[in-house]
Amino acid sequence: MLSKILNIRYPIIMAPMFLVTNNKMMIEALNNGIAACIPALNFRTTKDLDNALNTIREKSLPSGLGVNLIANKSNFKLEEQLQICIKNKVNFIITSLGNPNRIIEECKQNNIKVFCDVIDVKHAIKVEGLGADALIAVNKRAGGHAGKMSAKELIAKLKLSCQIPIISAGGIGTKEQISQILNYGAIGVSIGSPFIACHEADISTAYKQACIDYNATDIVMTNKISGTPCTVINTPYVKKVGTNQNIIEKFLSRNKKIRKWIKRFTFYCGMKKISKSAFGSTYKTVWCAGPSIQYTDRIMLVKDIIKKLTTHKN
C-alpha cells in the first residue's frame, strides 16, 4: 500500500497542480495524513523552491513530501531542481513529460522514491526498466495532461505488463471511488482538482467559484495552451477561441526544424495566460481543472477535504 511506502495514514497523494499548489496546502496535507506533491514549475527560481521545501519541512510531519519535475528538454532548470530535492531530502518525486532516467539514477543513490506519470503500457514498461518505484496511471478523467483510457482499463493493462506498484490519477472525488480504485489493484490514488477550491490556495476566488459552478461535463481538452492536450474549464473565452490549433499553428507544430521552439513558445504564452486567469481578473479566462470538480460544492479547508475523502459518505 502507498501508506506503507510513504509512511502516511491514507493512501492519497495531493497531486501537483500548476500555479495552485503552495506551501500552505502542502503543510496542511502532510499534517493531516496524506502525501502531497508540489510542482517545481510553480517557483520562478530554484532558490524559491529551496526556501519552500525548507518551510514545508519545518512546519509539517516528515513523511510524504514530494516534488513534481518536468523531465523533458523544455525544462532548462531540471538539474538544479533535482539537486534541491536531494538537498532537502524529499520523500518522492513524480516525473512528467520526458525520459526520467537521469532523475531515477540520482534518486536511487539518495533513497528518494520516483513515481512516473504514464498513460499507456509502452511508457510504463520503459520507466519500470529504468528503475521507477511506482507508476502514476494517468487516466482519461485526469486534470491537466490526461490519458486516453479509463482507470479500470489502464490499471488492468498495467498490472498485466508491469511488476511495480500502480497509483491511479484522475476523476476521483469520493471515499467510495478511492475504495473502488484500490479494488482494481492500485495501491493508492493521486487527487488534484477537488483541492483547487480550498481556503489555503492563493488563486482567485473566481477560479475557486468556477470549480463549484461548473461540473464534469464542462471540462474540455485543448491543445492551444501548451502544445500538448490539456484539460480546462469550458469558459465563454475558451468557447470563443476554440480548443484546437488553427491551420498555421498545426503547420508550425509539425515542422521538424522549428517545432521544438514553437512548442516552447506556445507553452510560454499558454502558461502566461493561465497564470493571469488564476490570480486575477481577465476576460481571457483559462482555468485548468479536471472532471472531479464535480464533487466540489463549496470552498473548504484542506483538512476538511481530506476528511470528506476519507471518513464522510459523499
Image: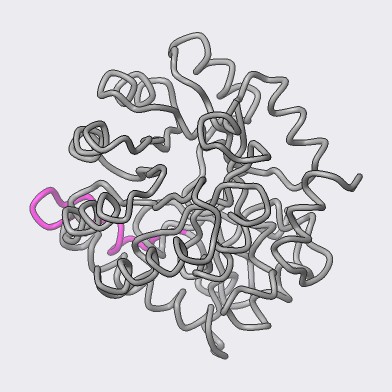
Q: Position of residue 23 (x, y in %)?
A: 50, 69
Considering every residue shown, the one lying at the far top of the view is: 160
Q: Seen in the image, is 129 located left or right of residue 284?
A: left
Please check the rendered image and state whether residue 310 is part of the magenta-colored stretch, yes or no. no
Which residue shows up at 38% across the image and 66% down it? 54
User: Residue 251 lies in magenta, yes or no?
Assistant: yes
Q: Relative to 206, is 125 above or below?
A: above
Looking at the picture, tell me which residue is in the foreground, 72 or 41.
41
Q: Quadrant of residue 185?
A: top right
> Picture coordinates of residue 254 (x, y %)?
22, 50
Q: Position of residue 200 (x, y in %)?
A: 63, 74
x 47%, y 70%: residue: 19
Q: Check the image and report above or below for 120 versus 228.
A: above
Q: Quadrant of the N terminus?
A: top right
Which of these two is toward me, 214 or 65? 65
Classify residue 132 as left or right of residue 118.
left
**In the image, is residue 180 above or below residue 294?**
above
Q: Is residue 2 above or below residue 60?
A: above
Q: Using residue 125 as the reference point, say whether residue 274 is left or right of it.
A: right
Residue depicted at x 38% and y 52%: 228
Which residue, as the protein is rendered here, is positioned at the far bottom?
Answer: 281
Residue 311 falls left or right of residue 24: right
Residue lying farthest to the left in this orientation: 257
Task: Estimate the x, y position of residue 286 in percent, counting from the top left.
Answer: 53, 73
Q: Quadrant of residue 296?
A: bottom right
Q: Residue at x 39, y 51 (%)?
A: 68
Determine the residue located farthest toward the right in the rendered image. Answer: 313
How many labels, in total? 0
**Magenta-colored span:** 244-259
In-front residue for pair 267/258: 267
